Image (cartoon, rainbow, N blue to C red):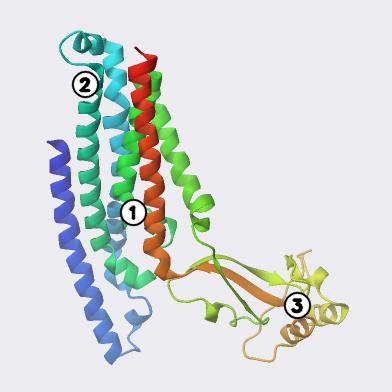
Amino acid sequence: MIFGLLLAGFTVLTILTGNHFWHEYQQTLSSCRQNPATPSCSDIEGSFGPSYGAILRLVYVTSIGVPLIFGLFLGAPLFSREFEEGTNKLVWTQSVSRRKWLTTKIVWILVFAALYGLAISLLVSWWGRTTNALDHSRFDTGQFDVQGIMPFAYSVFFTAIGFTVSAWFRKTMVALAVTLVLFIAFQASIGQWLRPHYMAAISITSPMGPDDLQSKVPVGAWLLDRGILNKNGKEIGDIFPAAPLQCQQIIQQQTPQGNGLAIRVKTFPGAGDPIDACLNKAGFHQIAKYQPSYRYWDFQRIEAGIYFGASIILISAAYWFVLKRDA
């Protein structure tokens, strides 16, 4: 009942505000085509007012919070509460077998979590069209995790985690704590350490210069890394000690040295910067690695597949704990 009311309220919020901000964005965009000098055209998002940022945070926190709630309040107490109160033994001594008892509980809760997560996925992805059009950053961790099919996958996965730790530890408070820790660990690590490697990144190079490399990165791409390579292809950090002597002399002449700060290349507007020209002549160049925006749905499917596969393993472990270890 409570989950139904929350979903109904969230649906009303996303539909009303999603339509409002999308129409406002379209109107502002149309106006800017006719009068590009209008101040709001340089910051369309800022013209929406503070309510946009507040609702954005609420929508995204709800999207990522629902799977956690399922893990904490549907998965973690499911078996541990039964073990603590001893009601599992009462059921097992009746006509209901352990396997039927376990399967019924898991299936009903998983179906509920999956459908609820799917509804959240659809609502948030639809609501986020304005943000996606403004920022072109669907690969960002704060965007990738709350849109597409990820809330759906997370809802199933973290509910399955709750099942497993509940059957393993058989203590509700312990199961809650472990579920919460695992949620934080997965959210903090997957996007940073695993997600960038789902597909081989695209590498681009360009001569030294303030704008050469950035102009080659497509709009909406996920920029993973950028750096500077010497003539041998080795990435360097501080340019000054790695630069040839003649380039160091130019850097010393044109870069302020004071307060004990490390000397780095200073960028200058326009073409023909002598530092860049010297470094280019010495074989230095810039490199960047990125994931193109057209791979967004491929990454969504890969990551969702990982979570669904892990959910199967977790549910199998829950079955083992209840049917074998506690037999």
**Badge 1 is on which residue?**
146
Q: Vertical placement of 115 versus 222: above or below?
A: above
Query: What kind of residue is marked 2?
Result: Trp
Query: What kind of residue is marked 1?
Result: Val
Q: For numbered disc 2, what is the local secondary structure?
A: helix
Where on the picture, by quarter, is residue 66?
top left
Is the residue marked by circle 3 packed among few (<14), some (14-19), or many (20+) residues within 10 Å? some
Where on the picture, by quarter, is residue 163?
top left
Q: Residue at x 58, y 82 (%)?
A: 211
- N-terminal-most mark, 2 or 3: 2
Between circles 1 and 3, the one closer to the viewer is 1
Q: Quadrant of the C terminus?
A: top left
How far apart in space, not on screen, are marks 1 and 2 (Cα)? 33 Å
Is the residue marked by circle 2 packed among few (<14), some (14-19), or many (20+) residues within 10 Å? few
Is the residue marked by circle 1 packed among few (<14), some (14-19), or many (20+) residues within 10 Å? many
- N-terminal-most mark, 1 or 2: 2
Q: Is residue 18 visible?
A: yes
Position in image of residue 13 (x %, y %): 17, 55
**Badge 2 is on which residue?**
101
Q: For numbered disc 3, what is the local secondary structure?
A: loop
Seen in the image, is 145 located left or right of residue 103? right
Q: Residue at x 29, y 24 (%)?
A: 77
Position in image of residue 140 (x %, y %): 43, 60
How far apart in space, not on screen, are marks 2 and 3 (Cα)? 74 Å
Report if the CB atoms under discs 1 and 3 are less than 8 Å apart: no
Q: In which quarter of the image is the N terminus?
A: top left
**Badge 3 is on which residue?**
255
